[in-house]
Image (cartoon, rainbow, N blue to C red):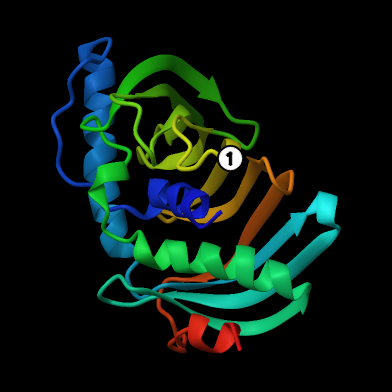
Amino acid sequence: MYWALSLIIACSVAALAPASVPDLDSPESAQIIQNYLSASQAHQDSLRGASMEVEIEASIPELKKRGKLHALRNISKLGQITYKVLGFQGDNTIKKEVIARFLSAEQQSQGDNSMAMTPDNYKFRFKGEQALQAGGKVYVFQLTPRKKAVGLFKGEVWLDAATYLPVLEKGRMVKNPTVFFRKVDFERAYSIQNGIAIPQHMNSVIDTRLVGKVELNVSYTNFEPESMEPAEPLLSTFLE
C-alpha cells in the first residue's frame, strides 16, 4: 500500500524540470505545453511558505475500518512539506497503515523528476477545449506514459486556459508495484486563485487482492500564501 500512495503523490509533488516538447499534434498544442511547463516552475516557487488545512479520510470497507485526520499542512521557504496534527478519530490501523503512509509518501516524493508530468515522461495528445460551468475554459490533454514504469499513469490533465496551470488530473497507474494490487485510480482537482493552483481535493481507490478496496479522500481548505505558524514534524508524534 505504501508504494501505491507514493506513486499517487509523486504525480503532483515532483518538481517540473525543463523539458523539450516532442510528439504533439500541432504547434498550437506544443506552445500550450511549453506555457504549462513555464507556469509550473513559477508555481512551485509561489507555494513556498504557504499553508492550508487538510482533512484526510480513509477506509477499508470490507474490514469496516475507517479514520479521519485533521491537520495543518505547511510548505517551508525551502519547499519542505510538514504537518501539524489538529485531531484524529477512527481506527488505529487506518491511522498507521493508510494515512501515515500517505503523508510519509508525500514527504519522500518531493523533487523526484522520474515521475513528473512532463513530455520527457509522457506523450501529450491534445483533445480540445472545454468550457467550465464556473466560467472560463480548459485545454484537455490525454497523457500516455513513454514507458510502462512504476509511478506513471494513463489519463488526462486539464489546463486552465488563462494560467496554463492544472485544474484536474486523473487516471490509472500503468504498472502496479506489487502483485497484491489489481489497480490504482486517482483524481485530483485544483482551484486557480490569484495565479496559484490551490489543491481542492484528491480521491483515490486502490483495489487490492487481500483486503479489497482501500479508499482515500483528501480535502484542502483555508489556504494561506504566508504561513503564520510553522508546522511540526508529523510522523514521530502521529504514530505514538
On screen, residue 155 above or below 164: above
Residue to which mark 1 is pinned: 181
Residue sitting farthest toward the right: 64
On screen, residue 179 above or below 58: above
Q: Amino acid at mark 1?
A: Phe
Residue at the image point whose x is 41% and y is 72% from the top: 50
Q: Can residue 234 be seen at all in this image of the molecule?
A: no
Residue at the image point whose x is 25% and y is 15% from the top: 24
In the rendered structure, the answer to whether residue 215 lies left or right of residue 78 reads: right
Residue 76 locus on image (x, y percent): 33, 77
Residue at the image point whose x is 45% and y is 29% from the top: 174
Residue 23 locus on image (x, y percent): 22, 15
> Closer to the camera, 155 or 98?
98
On screen, residue 237 above or below 206: below
Residue at the image point whose x is 30% and y is 26% from the top: 147
Residue 104 locus on image (x, y percent): 46, 68
What secondary structure is found at the residue carrying circle 1? strand
Quadrant housing residue 165? top left
Q: Can residue 28 be seen at all in this image of the molecule?
A: yes
Residue 191 locus on image (x, y percent): 53, 49
Quadrant housing residue 187? top right
On screen, residue 102 above or below 29: below
